[in-house]
């Protein structure tokens, strides 16, 4: 049975080698690099057995991308703790949104108004808008990339219309078609100051079931790479034309 491998990372600027992959089932790390074949080199390796291979990789590959914990225990926090992160971050807060809809949007009266009129209202005095406006006016950056389907769901169309309200308080809202998001994980997360990840877990009804905080440097770097790739391909919300 084939392994389920997840690309972990690379320091290569050219062809993606050397690199690390993680076996999703066993947690084993697969090291990809230039093979060591010189018999004199191999003779110096201890415990080198028949059928085994040796590869050479830069030290920084393991430092930057190798796991820092033998066994990571997830740190799960509630929504109140997540909300506090938007008050205490120092420089940047950024989110990837990948789901077809969110239960919290469907429960919002503004969503029902949008379905009835095609335009979503908002209250600029809501705590979210007040805080984000204060943060962006202080020079901090807040942004999102949303992955959209063709055709867009009602929830996605609602958020696209609502994006103008987010932008009014300084959020950078961008969009990406799902077919152009190949290689991005099907995960929703916030990344704060490029050092802390808040990974959002959902149930089948699109309700948040938990918020997992991740600070392991290699994992944070992987999510930062996802952010950079998403931002490279996404377009501002006001230039994104929904497909019917």
Image (cartoon, rainbow, N blue to C red):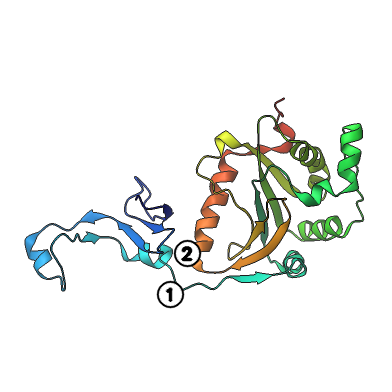
In 3D space, how far apart are the residues under numbered discs 2 and 1 (Cα atoms)?
Answer: 13 Å
Residue 86: give x, y in percent of width and height. Answer: 74, 64
Q: Secondary structure at mark 2?
A: helix
The residue most toward the left is 40
Mark 2 or mark 1, earlier in chain: 1
Residue 3: give x, y in percent of width and height. Answer: 37, 53
- Going 7% across and 61% down the picture, which residue do you hit? 39
Label disc, if present, on residue 218 of the rendered structure: 2
Residue 202, quarter of the rendered image: bottom right
Give the residue number, with chain letter if any, for mark 1.
Answer: 70
Q: Is residue 132 left or right of residue 96?
A: right
The residue most toward the top is 244
The total of numbered circles placed on residues is 2
Residue 94, quarter of the rendered image: bottom right
Q: Secondary structure at mark 1?
A: loop
Position of 55 relative to 77 (above/below): above
Q: Is residue 154 visible?
A: yes
Q: Is residue 117 left or right of residue 84?
A: right
Closer to the camera in the image, 202 or 223: 202
Closer to the camera in the image, 244 or 25: 25
Residue 73: give x, y in percent of width and height. Answer: 54, 73
Name the image quarter holding the C terminus: top right
Label disc, if present, on residue 233 of the rendered structure: none
Q: Is residue 170 visible?
A: no
- Going 11% across and 71% down the picture, which residue do you hit? 44
Residue 164, quarter of the rendered image: top right
Closer to the camera in the image, 124 or 154: 154
- Going 67% across and 59% down the picture, which residue do you hit? 92
Closer to the camera in the image, 91 or 189: 189
Q: Nearer the viewer, mark 2 or mark 1?
A: 1
- Going 24% across and 60% down the picture, which residue do you hit? 56
Position of 6 relative to 69 (above/below): above
């Amino acid at each position: 049975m084939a392994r389920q491998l997840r690309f972990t990372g690379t320091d290569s600027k050219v062809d993606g080698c050397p690199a690390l992959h993680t076996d999703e089932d066993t947690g084993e790390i697969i090291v990809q690099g230039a093979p060591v074949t010189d018999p004199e080199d191999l003779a110096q390796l201890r415990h080198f057995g028949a059928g085994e291979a040796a590869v050479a990789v830069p030290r920084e590959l393991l430092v930057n991308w190798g796991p820092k914990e033998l066994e990571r225990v997830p740190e799960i926090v509630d929504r109140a703790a997540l909300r506090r992160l938007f008050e205490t971050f120092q420089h940047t807060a950024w989110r990837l949104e990948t789901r077809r809809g969110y239960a919290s949007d469907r429960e919002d009266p503004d969503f029902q108004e949008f379905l009835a009129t095609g335009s979503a209202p908002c209250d600029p005095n809501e705590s979210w808008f007040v805080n984000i406006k204060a943060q962006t006016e202080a020079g901090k950056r807040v942004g999102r990339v949303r992955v959209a389907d063709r055709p867009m769901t009602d929830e996605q169309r609602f958020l696209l219309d609502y994006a103008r309200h987010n932008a009014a308080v300084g959020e950078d809202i961008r969009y990406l078609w799902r077919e152009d998001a190949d290689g991005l994980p099907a995960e929703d997360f916030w990344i704060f100051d490029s050092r802390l990840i808040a990974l959002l877990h959902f149930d089948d009804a699109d309700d948040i079931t938990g918020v997992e905080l991740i600070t392991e440097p290699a994992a944070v770097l992987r999510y930062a790479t996802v952010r950079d790739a998403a931002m490279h391909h996404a377009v501002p919300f006001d230039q994104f034309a929904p497909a019917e």
